[in-house]
């Protein structure tokens, strides 16, 4: 089966439902809160951990909604105008 963009029942398999996005954000938020609240760490390490989690979640959301493609290109419009990652 081809990767990314494979059609299953007329729906793009790479697309995410709103329920999936909300549940994932809730789970990631709760896990991050648990780590911050109950695991003793230096505040600098917590800040770095929080920043990394936020960056990863934003990139995941951009990829999931089709703004960033599989190879890292940024899709600006439906006219297939892309910026390739250098």
Image (tube, rainbow, N blue to C red):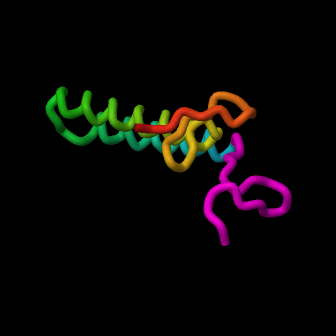
Can residue 61 be seen here?
no
Q: Quick check: is 6 in the magenta stretch? A: yes
Closer to the camera, 74 or 47? Answer: 74
Residue 59 shows in this picture = yes
Q: Is residue 50 above or below residue 60?
A: above
- List the single residue furthest toward the right: 10
Question: At 42% from the left edge and 39% from the top edge, which residue is drawn?
Answer: 56
Residue at image point 60% right, 43% down = 64
- So how many labels did they put on this image? 0
- Observer-nearest of 16 and 50: 16
At 54% from the left and 33% from the top, the residue drawn is: 83
Q: Is the N terminus in the top left, top right, bottom left or bottom right quadrant?
A: bottom right
Task: State the image coordinates of residue 9 (x, y, percent, origin top left).
Answer: 84, 62
Q: Nearer the viewer, residue 66 or 28?
A: 66
The image quadrant that residue 31 belongs to is: top left
Tell me residue 41's x, y (percent): 17, 36
Residue 59: percent from left, percent from top: 48, 37
Overall secondary structure of the magenta section: loop
Answer with the quarter of the image where residue 48 lies: top left
Q: Is residue 16 magenta?
A: yes
Q: Which residues are magenta?
A: 1-18
Q: Is residue 32 left or right of residue 73?
A: left
x, y percentage for residue 69?
57, 44
Q: Residue furthest left?
A: 42
Check the image and name the residue furthest to the bottom. Answer: 1
Quadrant occupied by the C terminus:
top left
Q: Residue at x 60, y 34 (%)?
A: 82
In this view, the residue in front, 3 or 33, is 3
């Amino acid at each position: 089966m081809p990767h990314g963009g494979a059609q299953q029942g007329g729906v793009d398999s790479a697309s995410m439902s709103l329920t999936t996005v909300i549940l994932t954000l809730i789970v990631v938020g709760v896990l991050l809160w648990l780590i911050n609240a109950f695991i003793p760490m230096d505040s600098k390490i917590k800040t770095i951990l929080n920043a990394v989690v936020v960056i990863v979640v934003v990139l995941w959301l951009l990829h999931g909604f089709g703004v960033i493609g599989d190879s890292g290109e940024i899709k600006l419009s439906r006219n297939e105008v892309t910026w390739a990652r250098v």
